[in-house]
Amino acid sequence: MTVANVSTQGSEPVFHLIDEHAHPEGASTMLGFWIYLMSDCLIFAMLFATFGVLGGNYAAGPSPKDLFDLKLVAVNTTMLLLSSITYGFAMLTMEKSRVGATQAWLAITGLFGLAFIGIELSEFAHMIHEGATPQRSAFLSSFFTLVGTHGTHVTFGLVWLVTLMVQVARYGLIEANRRRLMCLSMFWHFLDVVWIGVFTFVYLLGMLR
C-alpha cells in the first residue's frame, strides 16, 4: 500500500491511498493450513516421544507380544494406505472437473477410512475385554493415547470428507471447494505418514522388545 498526497483539512492531516495490492479469496488458506499441520506434527512428535519413554513399562501386565495381532494391524494399515491412493484419484479427477468421478473416489476413500476406524475400535475393544486398559500400565496409557489420537484425527477427517461431498454435490467443483479438497488431501496424506510411524515404532518394534 502506497500512501501519498498528504493534505490538511483544518488541523487534521488527511492521507490519500494511491494503490493497494489485491487480496484474492483464500490466498492465505494454504499457508494457514500448513501452519496447522506443523502444529499437529509437534503433537504427534510429543506422543511418539512419550511412547518411546514409557513403552517398555508394563507394570507386570501384558506386553505387545501378548496383545498385538500383526496380521490384523497389517490389514488395517492396508485400508488406510488404499484410502490415500483413492483420494489421489479423487484429486486427479477434480483437476479434470469431473464431479461424478470425484464424488465416487471420495466415497471409496471414506469407506476405506471407515474400515480403518472399525478395525481399530475392534482392536481396542478386544484389549479392554482382556483387561488391557489405559490404566493398567504406562505402556498401555501411552499406546491408547498415541493410537487413539491418530484415530480421532481420522474420524474428524471422515466428517470433513462427508461435509465436502455435500458441498461438491450442491455447488460443484468451484474454486473454494477445490481449495478445501486440497487441504483435506494434505491432511489425509499426513495421517498416512503418521500411521506408518505408528505401525513401525509401536507395533513392529513393540513385537521385537
Image (spheres, rainbow, N blue to C red):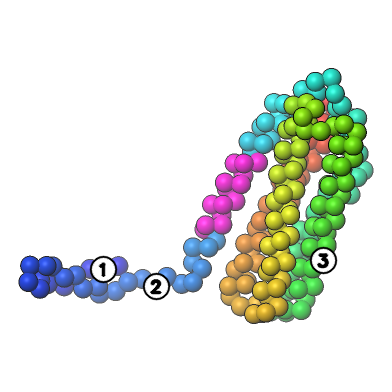
Residue at image x 63%, y 36%? 46
Res 22 quadrant in image: bottom left
Query: Going from the N terminus, do you reach mark 3 or mark 2 first?
Result: 2
Which circle marks residue 2 in the picture? Answer: 1
**x and y percentages locating residue 142 in the rendered image:** 73, 33
Q: Amino acid at mark 3?
A: Ile
- Per the rendered image, the range of residues in magenta is 31-44
Res 162 quadrant in image: bottom right
Residue ranking furthest to the top: 60
Query: Going from the N terminus, do you reach mark 1 or mark 3 first?
Result: 1
Read off the residue under disc 3: 108
**x and y percentages locating residue 186 in the rendered image:** 65, 58
Residue at image x 77%, y 29%? 135
SS type, badge 3:
helix
Magenta includes 38?
yes
The answer, for residue 117, to whether it is visible in the render is yes
**x and y percentages locating residue 79 in the rendered image:** 84, 54
Which circle marks residue 22 in the picture? Answer: 2
